Image (cartoon, grey):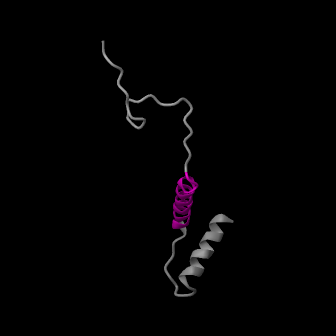
Amino acid sequence: MSAPTHLAPGHPSAPRAAGADVRLPWWALALPALAFGFLLILLAGSGQAHAASGEGSALVQVTERLLSAVG
């Protein structure tokens, strides 16, 4: 007669509890969404690229592009 083996709870062969509650931190959803939005804005604005004219700062130009892409 063989004795039953007891596996540690984290072992891959151990039985899992039905309906296990998996919780993600808030940033696990926010960061990919933010990255997707940023890349989408970069792609949307690439068709309107022009040579730098030297007027305005880079921050002003980025803000203008964000506002034109969103609005």
Q: Residue at x 54, y 81 (%)?
A: 58
Residue situated furthest top in the rendering? 1
Q: Assess whether residue 8 is covered by the magenta stretch.
A: no
Q: Residue at x 33, y 19 (%)?
A: 3
- The relative height of residue 55 versus residue 6 in the rendered view (above or below) is below
Q: Nearer the viewer, residue 19 or 58?
A: 19
Image mark count? 0
Q: Residue at x 31, y 16 (%)?
A: 2
Q: Residue at x 49, y 79 (%)?
A: 51
Q: Position of residue 21 (x, y in %)?
A: 57, 39
Q: Main secondary structure of the magenta part?
A: helix
Q: Position of residue 36 (x, y in %)?
A: 53, 57
- The relative height of residue 1 versus residue 17 in the rendered view (above or below) is above
Check the picture and name the quadrant holding the C terminus: bottom right
Q: Nearer the viewer, residue 69 or 26?
A: 26
Q: Assess whether residue 40 is covered by the magenta stretch.
A: yes
Q: Position of residue 17 (x, y in %)?
A: 51, 31
- The relative height of residue 35 versus residue 58 in the rendered view (above or below) is above
Image-quadrant location for residue 57: bottom right
Residue situated furthest right in the rendering? 71
- The relative height of residue 17 versus residue 54 in the rendered view (above or below) is above
Image-quadrant location for residue 19: top right
Q: Position of residue 46 (x, y in %)?
A: 51, 66
Residue situated furthest bottom in the rendering? 55
Check the picture and name the quadrant holding the N terminus: top left
Q: What segment is highlighted magenta in the picture?
A: 25-46
Instruction: Answer left or right for 29 relative to 15.
Output: right
Q: Nearer the viewer, residue 12 or 4?
A: 4
